[in-house]
Image: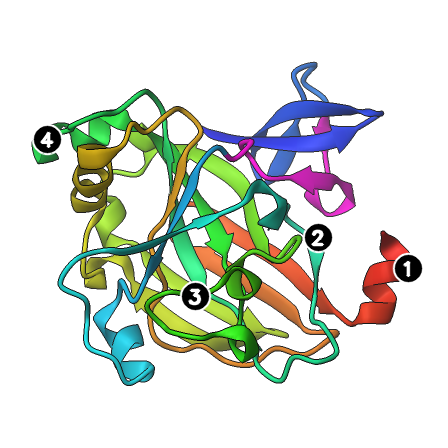
């Protein structure tokens, strides 16, 4: 099943997907284009992977890492489907990153590889925009690269783990204004989902609502104000976001 959250009639409302439409608990069906979307889960601790696709590492002239390169993202960074993301006026290169997001479903500590999927609630899509102007080191991106307000759209749906038979064989792609600019597969991850859960749970406890952003394949491209960015993952759907300039951003907030 696909689960989501919207802001509707002054409240946060859980919804599900039904034949391409949005279903309220009452059974009423709504058009997804007309809704104010929220991330499908309220993010807990969020772990983002750097260089977790060998082709993307090569794209940046780096070797694939020997151990997972993980950094944290704050809750302020997230926004929902069909929302806007600001491109600051001083930025010269801001690119999307289509990523499979793994949502933890129950407390996990010292998890074995064979049991790792038992701790997954489901999967969603993240577009983890990066502001390359602020990058000091590809291995240690500073806060301004990945933690600006509303710089990471998430959603629209959380798909139950049981409904994705093999999350390591999903196609990913990104479109800028309808033109495909990125294509990849989760099968090309350097560290797969079980490996990441094992690694993180060795030294810390994972909690329900924690999210692992698993990295992006090759094919990054600069984005400009007015661009509509669609990040798509097989079996989950499309996450739509629009890049805006400072004037538009401040007028809407």
| Earlier residue among tags 2 and 3 | 2
| Earlier residue among tags 1 and 2 | 2
Q: Secondary structure under badge 1?
A: helix
| CB contact under 8 Å: marks 2 and 3 | no
- Residue 204 lies, in percent from the top left, at 27, 32
Say if the magenta span includes residue 33: yes
The answer for how far apart the CA atoms under marks 3 and 4 are is: 29 Å
Q: Secondary structure under badge 3?
A: loop
Q: Which residue is mark 4?
A: 112
| Earlier residue among tags 3 and 1 | 3
Q: Secondary structure under badge 2?
A: strand
Residue 141's disc is 3
Q: Which residue is mark 1?
A: 251
| CB contact under 8 Å: marks 3 and 4 | no
Q: Which residue is mark 2?
A: 83
| Earlier residue among tags 4 and 1 | 4
């Amino acid at each position: 099943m696909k689960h989501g959250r919207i802001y509707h009639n002054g409240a946060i409302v859980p919804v599900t997907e039904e034949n391409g439409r949005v279903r309220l608990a009452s059974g009423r069906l709504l058009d997804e284009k007309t809704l104010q979307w929220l991330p499908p889960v309220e993010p807990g601790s969020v772990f983002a992977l750097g260089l977790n696709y060998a082709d993307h590492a090569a794209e940046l002239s780096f070797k694939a890492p020997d151990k997972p390169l993980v950094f944290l993202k704050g809750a302020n960074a997230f926004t929902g489907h069909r929302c806007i993301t600001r491109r600051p006026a001083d930025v010269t290169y801001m690119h999307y990153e289509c990523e499979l997001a793994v949502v933890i479903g129950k407390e996990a500590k010292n998890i074995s590889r064979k049991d790792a999927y038992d701790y997954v609630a489901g999967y969603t899509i993240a577009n983890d925009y990066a502001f390359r102007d602020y990058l000091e080191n590809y291995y240690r991106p500073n806060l301004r690269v990945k933690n600006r307000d509303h710089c990471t759209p998430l959603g629209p749906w959380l798909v139950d783990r049981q409904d994705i038979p093999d999350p390591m064989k999903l196609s990913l792609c990104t479109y800028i204004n309808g033109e495909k600019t990125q294509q990849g597969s989760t099968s090309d991850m350097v560290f797969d989902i079980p490996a990441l859960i094992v690694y993180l749970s060795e030294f810390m406890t994972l909690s329900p609502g924690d999210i692992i952003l698993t990295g992006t394949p090759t094919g990054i491209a600069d984005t400009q104000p007015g661009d509509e960015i669609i990040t798509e993952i097989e079996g989950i759907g499309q996450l739509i976001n629009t890049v805006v300039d400072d004037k538009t951003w401040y007028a809407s907030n």
